[in-house]
C-alpha cells in the first residue's frame, strides 16, 4: 500500500525510482525531519521480494524545505555509484551534493564560515568539516551543480584603499594570481602574514585537483591582498611587473 | 604602550616589576598583558588585564627567572574598548573571526591543554587566520614544577583562572595604525638532509630523510644531531621552527614542542654560537619601538640568556610563541605603524 506522506516526500526531495522513502520522522519543535531512503526491493516470480543486497547506511544533511532541515539516511547497496545524484553526498561528508554545492557557492563569493551557517541554518562543525575537506583536496566544489555566477571578489574592507582611489590589486581574472599561487612567480615578501598564508595556500593547491576549489583558493588570496592593500605596496609593485 | 609611563628609558614592550607597582598600574584602569608565576597572579586585584603563568623573562636588565616579579605590557586602547574572550576547543577556530576589522588580538594559551594542541595543529586552517593580526604565547610553569603545577591563563576582569581555556584580548585600533607582526628567528636551515613527515603530530616515529623512510630517533642518534637545534622549514621566506622535546631511542619516538606538518620540508638548523649577540645584531632598527614581544624559553635555556640582554627587546620567555600560528624558539614582536 502506498503511504501518501512517503510518496509526497519522495517528490519534494526529487528522489527518483528505484529509490523510495521508507519512513520519516518529523520533529516540528526542532525543525528537523529525518528521512530513511532505500531502493525498492527487487521482486522475483509471483512478486516475491528478492533478498536485499549488502548495503551500508550514509547520513547527509540535505537542502531545507521552508524552516525544516532534512537529514537523509540512505541505504546504499555496496558498489553503487551515486555520482550525479544531488540528494546523496560523498562518503564521509556532512552534506548532500545539492547542499554542498550551495555552501560552496557561498564560499566562492567570500562569505565567511559563520555567515554561511547563518544563511543556510547549518551546524558550524559540519560546515567546518566540509571546508577542511575542500582545503585538503578531499572534496570538490561543483560535483552537483556548478555555480553559474562569475567570480566576484568580496568588497574591500579594513586596510583596503578607499573606493575613490584606484586599487593597485590586479583583477581576480589576472593570470598573475595563478602564477603566484603555483610558485612560478616569486615575490620578495616583507609581510609575515602573507608569507605564512602563501605557504599554506601553495601546499593546499598541491592537493586540490578540483578547478572550482582551486578558484576559491585564488579568491582567498585575492581577498587577502584587497584587505591588506595599504601594507602590501612592496609586494604589489612586484605583482604589477608580473 | 609603556607599562611604566614615568620612566622614559623603560622598554616599550614591557617592564618587569614588583607586585606593588603592578597593583598601581591595574588600579589606573589601563589594559594590561601580564606574565608571572601563578602564585603572584592570584594576589592581583581585578582589573583590565589578561595574564598567563610563567616565571622566565627578558627584563629591562636582562634575562631573569623570578617568582616575585611580574612582567607587564600596557596594551593600546585608543579606538574602542578591548574585549576579553575565552576559547575552548569548540570555538577556538573563531578567534580571528571574532577579532575587530582593524585591530590586534593577543592570545594566551595554557601549555599541555587540548586547546593548545588544537591551536598548534589547526590554526593555519582557521578561517581568516592570516587576515587579521594575531600574536600571543603559551603559558607555562617553572621547570622545577613540571608535572606538579598546571600552566594557567587568567581573566583579570573576573579573576577567573583556567588551565583548559585560551584567553584572547581583541583590541580595536584606529584605521591609521597597522600592527605589523615580525618574528626574529636565529635559526636557518642547515645544509643537511631534507626531512619530511608522513603525518601531522607532536611526536613522530618514522620520517622520510631525502625520500627514504627511516626511524627518526635512530637517525638523530646515528647522525649525532644536537637536538637543541630545531627543525626549520621555509614558509615562503619565513623560517618556522619545530623544537625537539624528547628523544626516546628505545621506543623509537621523538616528541616536539610544536607539531610537524606533512606538507612541509624540514632541515636541522645551523648552530648559533652566541644567542644574545645574535639577537642584538639581527634586530632591525625599527624593532626598538616594538610595543609587545615574547621569546622562547628554549632560547633562554640553550642560549644561557639569564643576565644577558637580547637588544632592546623585553618580554616573557614562554612555552611557545604565537604569530598567527604556533612557533618555537622564535622572538615575536609587534610594531604599531602609522599608515
Image (cartoon, rainbow, N blue to C red):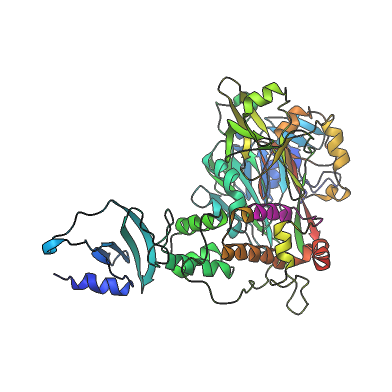
Residue A54 lies, in percent from the top left, at: 28, 51
* Quarter of the figure with residue A43: bottom left
Label the magenta part by its dominant secondary structure. Answer: helix
Q: Is residue B9 left or right of residue B92?
A: right
> Which residue lies most toward the bottom here?
A164
Q: Residue at x 79, y 38 (%)?
A: B188
Q: Is residue B79 visible to us here?
A: no
Q: Residue at x 69, y 31 (%)?
A: B68
Residue A18 lies, in percent from the top left, at: 27, 67
Q: Is residue B162 left or right of residue B132?
A: left
Q: In the rendered structure, does residue B86 fall within the stretch colored magenta?
A: no
Tell me the magenta residue range. A187-203
Residue sitting nearer the eye, A219 or B145: A219
Q: How many marks?
A: 0
> Which residue lies most toward the front here?
A45
Q: Is residue A49 visible to us here?
A: yes
| In this view, A117 is above or below B193 | below
> Which residue lies most toward the top here?
B250
Where is the C terminus of chain B found, in terms of image quarters?
bottom right
Residue A197 lies, in percent from the top left, at: 68, 55
Residue B232 lies, in percent from the top left, at: 72, 39
Residue sitting nearer the eye, B74 or A162: A162
Q: Residue at x 77, y 59 (%)?
A: A185
* Quarter of the figure with residue A169: bottom right
Residue sitting nearer the eye, A184 or B47: A184
Amino acid at each position: 500500500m502506498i503511504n501518501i506522506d512517503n510518496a509526497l516526500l519522495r517528490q519534494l526531495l526529487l528522489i527518483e525510482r528505484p529509490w523510495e522513502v521508507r519512513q520519516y520522522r518529523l520533529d516540528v519543535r526542532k525543525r528537523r525531519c529525518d528521512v530513511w531512503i532505500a531502493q525498492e526491493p527487487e521482486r522475483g516470480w509471483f512478486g516475491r521480494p528478492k533478498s536485499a543486497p549488502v548495503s551500508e547506511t550514509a547520513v547527509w544533511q540535505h537542502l531545507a524545505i521552508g524552516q525544516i532541515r532534512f537529514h537523509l539516511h540512505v541505504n546504499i547497496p555496496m558498489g553503487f555509484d551515486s555520482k550525479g545524484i544531488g540528494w546523496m553526498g560523498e562518503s564521509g561528508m556532512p552534506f548532500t551534493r545539492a547542499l554542498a554545492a550551495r555552501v560552496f557557492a557561498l564560499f566562492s563569493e567570500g562569505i565567511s564560515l559563520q555567515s554561511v551557517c547563518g544563511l543556510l541554518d547549518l551546524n558550524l562543525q559540519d560546515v567546518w568539516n566540509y571546508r577542511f575537506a575542500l582545503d585538503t583536496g578531499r572534496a570538490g566544489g561543483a560535483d552537483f551543480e556548478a555555480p553559474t555566477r562569475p567570480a566576484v571578489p568580496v568588497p574591500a574592507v579594513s586596510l583596503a584603499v578607499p573606493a575613490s582611489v584606484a586599487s593597485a590589486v590586479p583583477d581576480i581574472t589576472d593570470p598573475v594570481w595563478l602564477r603566484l599561487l603555483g610558485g612560478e612567480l616569486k615575490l620578495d615578501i616583507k609581510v609575515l602574514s602573507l608569507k605564512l598564508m602563501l605557504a599554506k595556500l601553495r601546499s593546499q593547491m598541491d592537493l586540490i585537483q578540483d578547478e572550482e576549489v582551486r578558484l576559491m583558493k585564488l579568491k582567498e588570496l585575492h581577498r587577502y591582498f584587497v584587505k591588506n592593500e595599504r601594507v602590501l605596496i612592496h609586494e604589489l609593485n612586484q605583482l604589477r611587473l608580473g | 604602550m609603556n607599562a611604566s609611563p614615568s620612566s622614559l628609558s623603560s622598554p616599550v614592550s614591557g617592564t618587569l616589576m614588583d607586585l606593588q607597582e603592578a597593583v598601581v598600574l591595574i588600579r589606573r584602569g589601563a589594559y594590561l598583558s601580564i606574565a608571572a608565576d601563578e602564585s603572584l597572579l592570584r594576589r592581583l586585584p581585578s582589573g583590565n588585564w589578561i595574564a598567563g603563568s610563567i616565571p622566565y623573562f627578558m627584563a629591562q636588565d636582562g634575562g631573569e627567572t623570578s617568582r616575585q616579579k611580574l612582567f607587564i605590557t600596557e596594551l593600546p586602547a585608543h579606538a574602542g574598548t578591548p574585549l576579553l574572550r575565552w576559547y575552548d576547543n569548540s570555538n577556538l577556530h573563531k578567534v580571528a573571526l571574532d577579532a575587530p576589522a582593524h585591530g590586534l588580538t593577543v592570545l594566551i594559551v595554557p601549555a599541555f591543554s587540548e586547546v593548545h594542541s588544537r591551536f598548534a595543529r589547526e590554526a593555519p586552517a582557521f578561517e581568516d587566520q592570516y587576515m587579521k593580526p594575531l600574536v600571543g604565547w603559551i603559558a607555562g610553569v617553572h621547570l622545577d614544577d613540571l608535572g606538579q603545577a598546571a600552566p594557567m591563563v587568567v581573566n583579570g576582569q573576573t579573576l577567573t583562572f583556567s588551565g583548559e581555556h585560551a584567553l584572547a584580548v581583541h583590541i580595536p585600533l584606529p584605521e591609521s595604525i597597522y600592527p605589523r607582526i615580525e618574528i626574529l628567528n636565529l635559526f636557518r636551515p642547515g645544509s643537511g638532509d631534507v626531512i619530511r613527515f608522513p603525518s601531522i603530530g607532536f611526536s613522530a616515529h618514522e620520517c622520510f630523510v631525502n625520500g627514504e623512510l627511516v626511524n627518526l630517533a635512530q637517525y638523530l642518534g646515528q647522525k649525532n644531531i644536537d637536538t637543541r637545534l630545531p627543525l626549520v622549514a621555509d614558509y615562503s621566506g619565513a623560517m618556522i621552527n619545530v623544537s625537539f622535546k624528547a628523544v626516546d631511542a628505545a621506543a623509537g619516538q621523538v616528541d616536539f614542542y610544536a607539531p610537524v606538518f606533512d606538507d612541509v620540508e624540514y632541515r636541522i638548523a645551523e648552530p648559533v654560537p652566541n644567542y644574545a649577540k645574535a639577537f642584538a645584531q639581527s634586530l632591525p632598527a625599527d624593532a626598538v619601538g616594538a610595543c609587545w614581544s615574547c621569546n622562547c624559553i628554549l632560547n633562554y635555556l640553550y642560549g644561557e640568556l639569564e643576565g644577558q640582554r637580547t637588544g632592546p627587546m623585553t618580554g616573557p620567555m614562554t612555552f611557545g610563541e604565537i604569530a598567527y600560528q604556533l612557533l618555537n624558539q622564535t622572538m615575536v614582536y609587534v610594531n604599531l605603524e602609522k599608515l
